[in-house]
Image (tube, rainbow, N blue to C red):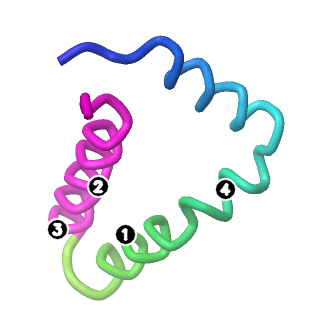
């Protein structure tokens, strides 16, 4: 499974042009990881963060 260059370039351009929008888009995930870190254990928060990153990567590179 390779990375689609056009989709990758589009994502990079959006983040460069609208960094605040990108931060708002990922802020719920940051809040969830921070709450897990604070309320449960850091290891669970790290695991959820890795799973979220992997899921996001998969959604960006999947072939339709």
Residue 57 placed where, x, y %?
Answer: 32, 37
Q: Quadrant of the C terminus?
A: top left
Q: Nearer the viewer, residue 10 or 25?
A: 10
Residue at the bottom extreme of this rendering: 39
- Could you tell whether 39 is left or right of 4 in the image? left
Disc 3: which residue? 44
Residue extent of the magenta highlight: 42-64
Residue at the front extreme of this rendering: 64
**Is label 2 in contact with label 1 (beta carbons under 8 Å)?**
yes
Q: Earlier in the sequence, mark 1 or mark 4?
A: 4
- The residue lying at 42 percent from left, 73 percent from top is 34
- The local secondary structure at tag 3 comes to helix
Residue at the right extreme of this rendering: 17
Alpha-carbon span between mark 1 and mark 3? 9 Å
Disc 1: which residue? 33
Disc 4: which residue? 23
Alpha-carbon span between mark 4 and mark 2? 15 Å
Q: Earlier in the sequence, mark 4 or mark 2?
A: 4
- The residue lying at 83 percent from left, 35 percent from top is 17
Is residue 62 positioned above or below 50 on the image? above
Which callout, 4 or 3, points to the residue nearer the camera? 4
Residue 5 placed where, x, y %?
Answer: 47, 12
Which class describes the residues within 10 Å of circle 1: few (<14), some (14-19), or many (20+)? many
State the count of labels.
Answer: 4
Q: Earlier in the sequence, mark 2 or mark 3?
A: 3
């Amino acid at each position: 499974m390779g990375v689609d260059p056009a989709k990758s370039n589009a994502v990079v351009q959006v983040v460069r042009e609208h960094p605040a929008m990108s931060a708002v888009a990922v802020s719920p995930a940051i809040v969830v990881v921070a709450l897990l870190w604070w309320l449960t254990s850091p290891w669970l928060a790290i695991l959820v963060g890795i799973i979220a990153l992997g899921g996001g990567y998969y959604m960006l590179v999947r072939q339709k």
